[in-house]
Amino acid sequence: MELSEYVQRGCQMLADPGCFDLAAFALVLRAAFRSLLEARADEAVLDHPDLKHIDPLVLKHSHAALATCILEAGKQKADKSTLSACLEDCKFDRERIELFCTEYQKNKNSLEILLGSIGRCPLLISDVSWRLEYQIKTNQLHKLYRPSYLVTLNVEDSRSHPDISFNCTMEQLQDLVGKLKDAAKSLERATQM
Protein backbone atom coordinates (compact mmCIF):
# COMPACT_ATOMS: atom_id res chain seq x y z
CA MET A 1 0.00 0.00 0.00
CA GLU A 2 1.57 3.25 -1.11
CA LEU A 3 0.74 6.54 0.59
CA SER A 4 1.78 10.05 -0.42
CA GLU A 5 4.34 11.94 1.62
CA TYR A 6 1.63 14.24 3.01
CA VAL A 7 -0.41 11.27 4.21
CA GLN A 8 2.65 9.60 5.70
CA ARG A 9 3.52 12.77 7.65
CA GLY A 10 -0.04 12.94 8.99
CA CYS A 11 0.08 9.30 10.04
CA GLN A 12 3.49 9.79 11.66
CA MET A 13 2.00 12.59 13.78
CA LEU A 14 -0.71 10.14 14.87
CA ALA A 15 1.98 7.63 15.80
CA ASP A 16 3.72 10.13 18.10
CA PRO A 17 2.58 9.45 21.72
CA GLY A 18 3.62 13.00 22.65
CA CYS A 19 1.10 14.42 20.20
CA PHE A 20 -1.67 11.79 20.33
CA ASP A 21 -1.99 9.50 23.32
CA LEU A 22 -3.75 6.18 22.74
CA ALA A 23 -7.17 7.56 23.78
CA ALA A 24 -6.85 10.55 21.42
CA PHE A 25 -5.69 8.24 18.62
CA ALA A 26 -8.75 6.03 19.15
CA LEU A 27 -11.04 9.07 19.00
CA VAL A 28 -9.48 10.33 15.75
CA LEU A 29 -9.63 6.82 14.27
CA ARG A 30 -13.34 6.44 15.05
CA ALA A 31 -13.98 9.97 13.80
CA ALA A 32 -12.25 9.15 10.50
CA PHE A 33 -14.38 6.05 9.98
CA ARG A 34 -17.52 7.93 10.99
CA SER A 35 -16.82 10.81 8.61
CA LEU A 36 -16.31 8.37 5.74
CA LEU A 37 -19.18 5.99 6.37
CA GLU A 38 -22.02 8.02 7.83
CA ALA A 39 -24.09 10.08 5.43
CA ARG A 40 -24.74 12.69 8.09
CA ALA A 41 -21.43 12.69 9.90
CA ASP A 42 -21.27 15.20 12.72
CA GLU A 43 -19.41 18.32 11.60
CA ALA A 44 -18.00 18.72 15.10
CA VAL A 45 -16.55 15.22 15.07
CA LEU A 46 -13.10 16.53 16.03
CA ASP A 47 -14.40 18.86 18.78
CA HIS A 48 -14.21 16.17 21.45
CA PRO A 49 -12.99 17.54 24.82
CA ASP A 50 -10.12 15.00 24.89
CA LEU A 51 -8.76 16.47 21.63
CA LYS A 52 -8.76 20.14 22.73
CA HIS A 53 -5.05 20.06 23.68
CA ILE A 54 -4.03 19.16 20.09
CA ASP A 55 -3.28 21.92 17.58
CA PRO A 56 -6.29 22.13 15.20
CA LEU A 57 -4.07 22.10 12.10
CA VAL A 58 -2.28 18.96 13.29
CA LEU A 59 -5.62 17.38 14.17
CA LYS A 60 -7.14 18.10 10.74
CA HIS A 61 -4.00 16.95 8.91
CA SER A 62 -3.92 13.72 10.92
CA HIS A 63 -7.64 13.13 10.43
CA ALA A 64 -7.33 13.63 6.65
CA ALA A 65 -4.28 11.36 6.51
CA LEU A 66 -6.05 8.63 8.45
CA ALA A 67 -9.15 8.90 6.25
CA THR A 68 -6.94 8.63 3.15
CA CYS A 69 -5.17 5.61 4.60
CA ILE A 70 -8.53 3.96 5.34
CA LEU A 71 -9.80 4.62 1.80
CA GLU A 72 -6.59 3.34 0.24
CA ALA A 73 -6.77 0.17 2.35
CA GLY A 74 -10.39 -0.35 1.31
CA LYS A 75 -9.59 0.29 -2.33
CA GLN A 76 -6.85 -2.32 -2.31
CA LYS A 77 -8.80 -4.72 -0.06
CA ALA A 78 -5.78 -4.78 2.24
CA ASP A 79 -5.38 -7.62 4.70
CA LYS A 80 -3.99 -7.33 8.23
CA SER A 81 -0.38 -8.01 7.23
CA THR A 82 -0.46 -5.33 4.50
CA LEU A 83 -2.01 -2.84 6.90
CA SER A 84 0.52 -3.67 9.61
CA ALA A 85 3.46 -3.22 7.23
CA CYS A 86 2.14 0.13 6.01
CA LEU A 87 1.42 1.39 9.52
CA GLU A 88 4.83 0.23 10.76
CA ASP A 89 6.38 2.34 7.98
CA CYS A 90 4.47 5.28 9.48
CA LYS A 91 6.04 4.50 12.91
CA PHE A 92 2.86 3.12 14.53
CA ASP A 93 3.40 1.01 17.64
CA ARG A 94 1.76 -2.42 18.16
CA GLU A 95 -1.21 -1.06 20.14
CA ARG A 96 -2.12 1.50 17.47
CA ILE A 97 -1.75 -1.04 14.69
CA GLU A 98 -4.04 -3.47 16.55
CA LEU A 99 -6.58 -0.72 17.20
CA PHE A 100 -6.52 0.36 13.54
CA CYS A 101 -6.84 -3.23 12.25
CA THR A 102 -9.71 -4.00 14.64
CA GLU A 103 -11.62 -0.87 13.64
CA TYR A 104 -10.88 -1.53 9.96
CA GLN A 105 -12.20 -5.12 10.18
CA LYS A 106 -15.32 -3.88 11.94
CA ASN A 107 -16.05 -1.38 9.15
CA LYS A 108 -14.58 -3.24 6.17
CA ASN A 109 -17.90 -4.32 4.60
CA SER A 110 -19.42 -0.84 4.87
CA LEU A 111 -16.27 0.66 3.40
CA GLU A 112 -16.31 -1.73 0.44
CA ILE A 113 -19.97 -0.92 -0.22
CA LEU A 114 -19.17 2.79 -0.12
CA LEU A 115 -16.24 2.43 -2.49
CA GLY A 116 -18.28 0.21 -4.82
CA SER A 117 -20.99 2.85 -5.09
CA ILE A 118 -18.46 5.42 -6.31
CA GLY A 119 -17.46 3.27 -9.31
CA ARG A 120 -16.79 4.51 -12.81
CA CYS A 121 -19.41 2.52 -14.65
CA PRO A 122 -21.05 4.38 -17.52
CA LEU A 123 -24.39 6.08 -16.99
CA LEU A 124 -27.49 4.20 -18.09
CA ILE A 125 -29.80 6.26 -20.29
CA SER A 126 -33.42 5.57 -19.44
CA ASP A 127 -35.17 8.04 -21.75
CA VAL A 128 -34.56 10.76 -24.34
CA SER A 129 -36.56 13.91 -24.79
CA TRP A 130 -36.08 16.63 -27.37
CA ARG A 131 -37.44 20.01 -28.31
CA LEU A 132 -37.18 21.94 -31.55
CA GLU A 133 -35.97 25.50 -31.13
CA TYR A 134 -36.04 28.10 -33.84
CA GLN A 135 -33.53 30.90 -33.43
CA ILE A 136 -34.56 34.07 -35.21
CA LYS A 137 -32.04 36.64 -33.95
CA THR A 138 -28.73 36.69 -32.12
CA ASN A 139 -27.77 39.13 -29.40
CA GLN A 140 -26.05 41.26 -32.10
CA LEU A 141 -29.43 41.68 -33.87
CA HIS A 142 -28.42 39.51 -36.83
CA LYS A 143 -31.24 37.52 -38.35
CA LEU A 144 -30.53 33.77 -38.41
CA TYR A 145 -33.71 31.76 -39.02
CA ARG A 146 -31.98 28.57 -37.89
CA PRO A 147 -33.62 25.53 -36.31
CA SER A 148 -31.81 23.64 -33.57
CA TYR A 149 -32.67 20.79 -31.25
CA LEU A 150 -32.38 20.69 -27.48
CA VAL A 151 -31.85 17.03 -26.57
CA THR A 152 -32.02 15.73 -22.99
CA LEU A 153 -30.77 12.26 -22.06
CA ASN A 154 -32.45 11.10 -18.86
CA VAL A 155 -30.07 8.95 -16.82
CA GLU A 156 -31.16 6.12 -14.54
CA ASP A 157 -29.49 7.37 -11.34
CA SER A 158 -30.54 11.02 -11.42
CA ARG A 159 -29.83 11.50 -7.68
CA SER A 160 -26.07 11.46 -8.15
CA HIS A 161 -25.90 12.42 -11.84
CA PRO A 162 -27.97 15.16 -13.48
CA ASP A 163 -29.61 14.57 -16.84
CA ILE A 164 -27.42 15.35 -19.83
CA SER A 165 -28.63 18.14 -22.10
CA PHE A 166 -27.11 19.47 -25.29
CA ASN A 167 -28.03 21.65 -28.25
CA CYS A 168 -27.37 20.59 -31.85
CA THR A 169 -28.23 21.44 -35.43
CA MET A 170 -30.27 19.16 -37.67
CA GLU A 171 -27.10 17.87 -39.37
CA GLN A 172 -25.45 17.09 -36.04
CA LEU A 173 -28.58 15.27 -34.83
CA GLN A 174 -28.74 13.23 -38.06
CA ASP A 175 -25.08 12.32 -37.61
CA LEU A 176 -25.73 11.24 -34.01
CA VAL A 177 -28.74 9.13 -35.04
CA GLY A 178 -26.67 7.48 -37.81
CA LYS A 179 -23.89 6.61 -35.36
CA LEU A 180 -26.39 5.19 -32.85
CA LYS A 181 -27.95 3.04 -35.60
CA ASP A 182 -24.47 1.75 -36.56
CA ALA A 183 -23.78 0.91 -32.90
CA ALA A 184 -27.12 -0.91 -32.62
CA LYS A 185 -26.40 -2.96 -35.77
CA SER A 186 -22.92 -3.87 -34.49
CA LEU A 187 -24.35 -4.97 -31.17
CA GLU A 188 -27.02 -7.01 -32.93
CA ARG A 189 -24.39 -8.73 -35.09
CA ALA A 190 -22.21 -9.45 -32.04
CA THR A 191 -25.09 -11.09 -30.16
CA GLN A 192 -25.98 -13.31 -33.13
CA MET A 193 -22.51 -14.94 -33.21
Image (cartoon, rainbow, N blue to C red):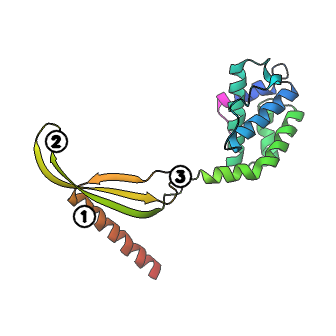
Residue 161's place in the image compared with 16, above or below, is below
* Element marked by disc 3: loop
Q: Tell me which amino acid carries mark 1.
A: Gln
- Seen at 79% across and 44% down, the residue is 104
Depth check: give the residue in front, 26 or 72.
26
Name the foreground residue: 146 vs 93.
Answer: 146
Q: Which residue is mark 2?
A: 138
Residue at x-position 42% and y-position 73%: 187
Residue 120 belongs to the span the image colors magenta: no
Name the element at disc 1: helix
Q: Position of residue 16 (x, y in %)?
A: 82, 23
Quadrant where the N terminus is found in the figure: top right
Q: Is residue 138 left or right of residue 41?
A: left
Residue at the spot of label 3 = 159
Mark before the other along the chain sequence, 1 or 2 = 2
Q: Amino acid at mark 2?
A: Thr
Q: Position of residue 95 (x, y in %)?
A: 89, 34
Residue at x-position 67% and y-position 36%: 3
Asked whether the beta carbons under mark 1 and mark 3 sit within 8 Å of each other, the answer is no
Q: Quadrant of residue 150?
A: bottom left
Residue 75: x %, y % from top left: 67, 48
Q: Which label sits in the foreground, 1 or 2?
A: 2
Q: Are marks 2 and 3 in contact (CB under 8 Å)?
A: no
Q: Which mark is residue 174?
A: 1
Asked whether residue 166 appears in the rendered view, the answer is yes
19 displayed left or right of 44 = right
Label of residue 95 in the image: none
| Residue 5 painted magenta | yes
Crowdedness near tag 1: few (<14), some (14–19) or many (≥20) residues, C-alpha within 10 Å: few
Q: Which residues are magenta?
A: 2-7
Q: Is residue 130 above or below residue 7?
A: below
